[in-house]
Amino acid sequence: MDIATVARLFRAAGVCWIRIETRDIHGIARSKSVPLSKFPAYAAKGVNFYGGMLLQDASGWDIPLEEELPPPDYLLKPDLDTLTLLPYAPGEARVIGDLYRDGAPAPEDPRVVCRRIVERFRERGWIPRSAFEYEFYLLHAGTREPVFRDKQICSTLRNNFDPAWRDELLTALEAHGIAVSTLSVENAPGQFEITIDPADGIAAADQAFMFRTVVKEVSRKHGYIATFMTKPFIDQAASGTHLHHSLIDASTGQNLFADPDGPHGLSELAWHFLGGLFEHARALIAVFSPTPNDYKRYQPGLFAPTSVCWGYDNRSAAFRIPADAHGSKARIENRLGGAAAHPYIPLAASLAAGWTGSNESSSHQRRSRRTWAGSKGCQRSRVPWTKRSMPSNRTQCSASCSGMRSSRPMLPSSGGTLRNVVAVAPTTAPRSGTVASTPTSGRNTVS
């Protein structure tokens, strides 16, 4: 469909404004709203966008570059496949865009990075199928207190405490092509989890990105604040991002992770993919836990990973094989992420790690073969996930990321390492067994 036809149909639907939207390095939606009359021109050539967008902290402050001028503007070009009417904002529509510079996609744009890695799988005849699970807290806007104070996991009364909010949220997510599987109260006052169906390729990250914004906007209409800050309350459970992976044969549509005769119903390819995740777990921590606040999540007894291991139906493992992961649902769950994790960066990094295990003759495959051969129970790495084994500062994160190499560059750096994907890494992390104080305002609260 050409853009003139799109504009005509939008005009008939009463649309006046189009949000051309991108994401900063924290996954926060940033956009320009343009009148419908101007949209055809911007769809063709892009709209100018601030060149320092990927160099800001979560509060919107620029991170200064010593003795350098601000970078030149980007062009933000809409991807028309992502056009969506906004049922909760009459007269408006949204479209996701990519950042361009010098006539080409900007290699530092997380969506561009993610697409490059997805294309590597497609070249092999594999379609990455992924699903994000986000947990979040719902707070009263006036008091910033949780919408209920008791801890009642999966309580029917709490699940449906506000049917108007629940129903409008469902309508809005479905309008974005996001199929909701379940909604339930989680393990803390005011904490929810909404699971959604998997999507193929870059669409999985697109849906996760839109999901976060939709939840925030619909909640604000109903007098609430939805926060994806990983640990907003120091004495309560943290919110996580769980990322499910499988690979689909592009020719047959079969799930390549499924093998009814394999351990736990998984194929050798799936175990090799898991081997890559194991090999690069320390580097993945940097992108799945992008702020110091995220490291408060790694505490025992709160359904967060406490060691680098895989487990069958084990929620304390870094990598989990769900109990129903058989046949068409065969998959591996990466549980490293806090809720503040950027959708595109973790998907890119996790797929890149799985790629190294699935394709490259290295220690990744040797490790995955050992895991596959002895896969009768929870497999734990020899080094427990403590201060000695998990990165505790930016230097350690960068060192782990630098070791993540590919025979061909997948990421925007000359060596093909993960380093440039990790645009935000924690400066410090609490020692094992300790808990840092909770920020009361400012930089993480907009996540």
Image: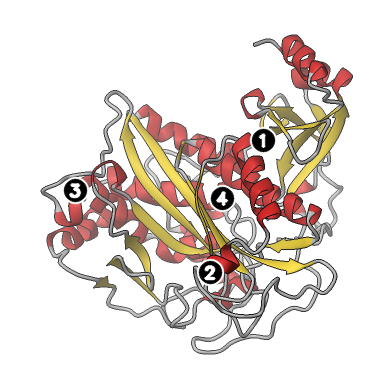
Question: Which residue carries the number 1 mark?
Answer: 106
Q: Distance between the Cα atoms at labels 1 and 4?
A: 15 Å
Q: Position of residue 317 (x, y in %)?
A: 36, 70
Question: Mark 1 packing: few (<14 Cα in 10 Å), some, or many (20+)?
Answer: some
Query: Quick check: 396 above or below 408?
Result: below
Residue where numbered disc 2 is placed: 186
- Tell me the quarter of the picture where residue 57 sits: bottom right
Marks 2 and 4 sit apart, C-alpha to C-alpha, by 25 Å
Q: Determine if residue 44 is in view.
A: yes
Q: Earlier in the sequence, mark 3 or mark 4?
A: 3
Disc 3/disc 2 C-alpha distance (Å): 34 Å
Q: Residue at x 39, y 45 (%)?
A: 406
Residue type (three-letter) at the residue carrying disc 2: Glu
Mark 1 and mark 3 lie on one chain; the one further toward the N terminus is: 1
Disc 2 is placed on an element classified as loop
In the picture, residue 280 is in which quadrant? bottom left
Q: Earlier in the sequence, mark 3 or mark 2?
A: 2
Q: Which residue is mark 4?
A: 345
Viewer-side residue, 401 vs 169: 169
Which residue has dot 3 on it? 268
On the image, the x and y values in percent for residue 226 come to 71, 61
Q: Within 10 Å of the Cα at label 3, are there few (<14), some (14-19), or many (20+) other Cα atoms?
A: many
Q: Nearer the viewer, mark 1 or mark 4?
A: 4
Q: CA distance from mark 3 to mark 4?
A: 26 Å
| Residues at marks 2 and 1, CA–CA distance in whole angstroms | 38 Å
Circles 3 and 2: CB distance less than 8 Å?
A: no
Quadrant placement of the C terminus = bottom right
Of circles 3 and 2, the one toward us is 2
Res 417 seen here: no
Q: Secondary structure at mark 1?
A: loop
**Left or right of 436 in this view: 275:** left
